[in-house]
């Protein structure tokens, strides 16, 4: 039968429930009831927020590339990732890629094709006591990942080196996509020739057999590529073809010859060939034109072959380094800036135009700087949204009178310091306007200013500087017209007598007038005399023998303190720290920019001046292979320019000449000893060259046969060594001599 509950029983049960509730509240109060109560409220995980999405990309065959994104949450949850591949641009469905759990994934690139990927991101809040973990999941957008066919190149890829040959053995070459009938070896370039050391390992591309007579033949090396936009093929090479002319290294694109180079022993050079988008067949060929060749291998060395978009990646502003100019600089002394546009592989876009220059005093289109205020100014250039800048120090108009810091050494000389007596006079057509006293102290040099008014001698005057303690220590300067000239006290501290003579006669190269070479001269009278005490003591030469630093100081023919020289050296040696590397780049500049002046050497009365500034002062158009013209010099000019540039870079240099040889060169103190350097003989001239046929092997030819030789007599005693006295001979005008300087050095 049904059971019923009585009132007493109901009351008892109610009382029991109330007691349980009270007990519960009492227990909670003892154990932080409020905290216990809130943790029973469920907490949901936040959806991840993607802060950087996946991006579609096209990569080259076998490239290494990582797809990645970035995401975060603010609820303290933990993010996890799962990657999927799909068959279309969709982030639904897809096939899970096992083993990839990070925010980045590097898809395989060993098979060409189009692939699609997305990533699933999950935020997890782990069990907080309410019965389980909480998660929230989102999916990224799907992206297209394109792998090009082998050899095909993407235009936007930063820099694609088809082959740089920097390998320890031939294994990489054996896998190369190049083909052809070439006999190829990968060899360490330094073992082949000293100048190749910069390139590490290179490819030696050899035409066989080693002896080929009339009949032609060729060896080829080719590769097919598919650039998707207009591109530039750049490569470095050196020929070792055993005939100056007749044997050829050629480059073809789709069967059309795009470049051809001849020659024996050409130095390393870099060339660029522009190509359209689409399929291109690149072909390197060493061929014979039927000319008989014998002896050695007919080889071409190739390295650093790249193919990149023909677009501007960066710009470079020239000249570089620490540059100086002054208010009122003459046209020949003004800095003219130029710029180059570089592609992503560092090759030069030679036809790039539209550079815009900016900065105080710079011409926006020509880049010529004509400053109007002193101090440091900034000059900039821009093209295609890329910019480069340079700081220039502008000195006041009277900068020659002021202290001078020799850039190569960092030593500052104060020049004229204190005058004590004397009144200037005019003598022999010479009027001195500075200094105003004839007896004074000077620190290293003093500045001489004035005018010469004697048209019978082309307004020339001679400045004779002699050390009082040893009359054999003498050096000369020539000045003309209105002049400002630093006179360097080259033989150490002590008293000097400096005399400025107006000339009574002068003999110069008759066919060149006032700009001809000085052959002989005479003067009369006492001249304007200065008594100068040099307070500077630079100590002995770095060779530990010469009692002064005459071989670092400028001279009349070696103007190593002139801004045109020091700015050039700052540019050429920019970024270099190795001593030999600095000297080498200066050597290469002289050799690749200068043609031997056969007329000055062979034609009586047509010899040009051979001081460093005169050589630098004019570019001649005689050889069209020099796109910007070239300098002309005989050995004296080569050597004077070598001494000026290398002294300005901080090295001591002796000019050395030999009457029996009819030749001049220099010795450079580097690595703890004097070393022979002959830029004239390192600039190849083929046999048979004569005054009416000025021939030079061209700007690409640089030899190092006479580069910093430890043996001062040269190769196989080719140089006759130091001649104690080299009196200047009118019969052999190639031999310079400056009277009174010990051992014919200045």
Image (cartoon, helix red, strand yellow):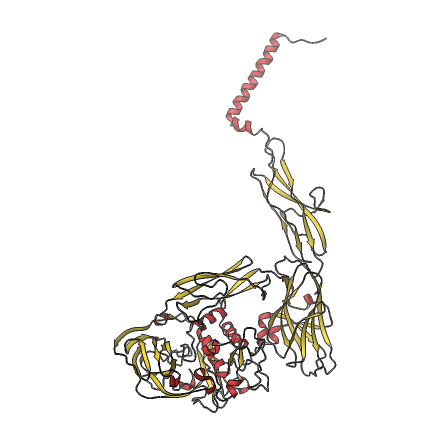
The foreground one among 330 and 478 is 330
Between 655 and 566, the residue placed more toward the observer is 566
- The quarter holding residue 449 reads bottom left
Q: Nearer the viewer, residue 66 or 671?
A: 66
From the top left corner, tell me how far across and down residue 688 is, in percent: 59, 87
Determine the residue positioned at 41% across, 62% down.
376
Tell me if 547 is positioned left or right of 91 in this view: left
Q: Is residue 174 visible?
A: no
* Residue 359 vertical position relative to residue 518 in the rendered view, above or below: above
Is 705 placed left or right of 116 in the picture?
left
Instruction: From this view, report whether residue 426 is shown above or below residue 410.
Output: below
Please say whether residue 366 is visible from this viewpoint: yes
Quadrant for residue 22, please give it.
top right
For the C terminus, the quadrant is bottom left
The outermost residue toward the left is 421
Residue at the limit of the structure toward the bottom, as seen here: 731
Q: Position of residue 62 (x, y in %)?
A: 68, 58
Q: How many marks?
A: 0
Q: Position of residue 97 (x, y in %)?
A: 70, 47
The image position of residue 398, as x and y in percent, is: 35, 70
Q: Quadrant of the N terminus?
A: top right
């Amino acid at each position: 039968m049904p059971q019923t509950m009585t009132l007493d029983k109901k009351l008892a049960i109610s009382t029991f429930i109330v007691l349980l509730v009270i007990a519960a509240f009492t227990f909670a109060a003892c154990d932080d009831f409020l905290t216990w109560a809130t943790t029973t409220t469920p907490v949901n995980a936040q959806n991840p927020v993607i802060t950087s999405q996946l991006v579609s990309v096209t990569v080259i065959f076998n490239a290494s590339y990582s797809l990645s994104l970035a995401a975060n949450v603010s609820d303290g949850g933990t993010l996890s990732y799962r990657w999927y591949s799909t068959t279309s641009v969709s982030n639904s469905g897809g096939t899970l890629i096992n083993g990839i759990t990070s925010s980045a994934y590097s898809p395989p690139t060993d098979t060409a094709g189009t692939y699609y990927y997305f990533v699933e991101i999950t935020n997890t809040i782990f069990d907080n006591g309410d019965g389980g973990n909480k998660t929230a999941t989102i999916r990224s957008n799907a992206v297209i990942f394109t792998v090009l066919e082998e050899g095909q190149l993407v235009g936007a890829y930063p820099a694609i080196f088809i082959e740089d040959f920097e390998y320890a053995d031939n294994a990489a070459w054996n896998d190369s996509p190049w083909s052809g009938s070439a006999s190829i070896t990968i060899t360490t370039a330094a073992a082949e020739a000293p100048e190749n050391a910069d390139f590490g390992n290179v490819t030696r591309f050899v035409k066989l057999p080693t002896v080929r007579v009339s009949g032609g033949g060729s060896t080829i090396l080719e590769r097919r590529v598919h650039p998707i936009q207009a591109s530039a093929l750049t490569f470095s090479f050196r020929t070792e073809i055993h005939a100056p002319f007749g044997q050829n290294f050629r480059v073809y694109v789709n069967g059309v010859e795009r470049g051809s180079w001849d020659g024996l022993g050409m130095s390393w050079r870099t060339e660029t060939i522009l190509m359209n988008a689409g399929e291109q067949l690149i072909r390197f060929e060493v061929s014979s034109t039927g000319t008989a060749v014998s002896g050695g291998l007919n080889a071409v060395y190739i390295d650093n072959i790249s193919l990149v978009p023909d677009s501007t990646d960066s710009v470079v502003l020239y000249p570089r380094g620490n540059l100086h100019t002054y208010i009122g600089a003459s046209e020949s002394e003004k800095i003219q800036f130029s710029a180059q546009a570089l592609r992503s592989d560092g090759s030069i876009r030679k036809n790039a135009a539209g550079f815009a220059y900016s900065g105080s005093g710079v011409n926006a289109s020509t880049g010529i700087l004509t400053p109007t205020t002193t101090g440091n100014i900034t000059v900039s250039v821009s093209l295609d949204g890329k910019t480069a800048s340079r700081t220039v120090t502008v000195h006041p108009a009277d900068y020659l009178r002021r202290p001078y810091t020799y850039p190569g050494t960092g030593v500052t000389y104060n020049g004229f310091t204190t005058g004590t007596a004397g009144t200037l006079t005019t003598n022999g057509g010479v009027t001195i306007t500075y200094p105003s006293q004839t007896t004074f102290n000077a620190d290293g040099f003093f500045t001489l200013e004035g005018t010469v008014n004697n048209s019978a001698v082309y307004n020339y005057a001679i400045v004779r500087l002699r050390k009082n303690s040893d009359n054999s220590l003498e050096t000369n300067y020539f000045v003309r017209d209105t002049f400002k000239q630093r006179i360097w006290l080259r033989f150490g501290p002590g008293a000097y007598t400096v005399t400025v003579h107006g000339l009574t006669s002068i003999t110069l190269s008759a066919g060149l007038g006032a700009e001809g070479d000085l052959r002989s001269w005479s003067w009369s009278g006492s001249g304007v005399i200065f008594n100068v005490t040099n307070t500077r003591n630079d100590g002995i030469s770095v060779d530990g023998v010469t009692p002064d630093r005459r071989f670092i100081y400028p001279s009349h023919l070696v103007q190593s303190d002139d801004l045109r020289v020091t700015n050039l050296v700052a540019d050429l040696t920019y970024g270099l720290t190795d001593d030999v590397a600095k000297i080498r780049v200066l050597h290469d500049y002289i050799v690749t920019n200068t043609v031997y002046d056969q007329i000055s050497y062979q034609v009586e009365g047509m010899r040009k001046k051979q001081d460093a500034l005169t050589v630098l002062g004019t570019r001649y158009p005689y050889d069209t292979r020099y796109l910007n013209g070239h300098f002309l010099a005989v050995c004296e000019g080569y050597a004077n320019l070598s001494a000026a540039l290398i002294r300005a870079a901080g090295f001591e240099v002796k000019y050395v000449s030999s009457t029996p040889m009819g030749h001049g060169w220099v010795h450079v103190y580097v690595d703890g000893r004097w070393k022979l350097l002959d830029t004239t003989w390192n600039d190849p001239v083929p046999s048979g060259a004569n005054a009416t046929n000025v021939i030079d092997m061209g700007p690409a030819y640089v030899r190092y046969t006479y580069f910093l030789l430890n043996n001062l007599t040269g190769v196989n005693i080719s140089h006759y060594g130091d001649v104690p006295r080299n009196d200047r001979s009118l019969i052999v005008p190639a031999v310079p001599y400056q009277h009174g300087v010990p051992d014919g050095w200045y």
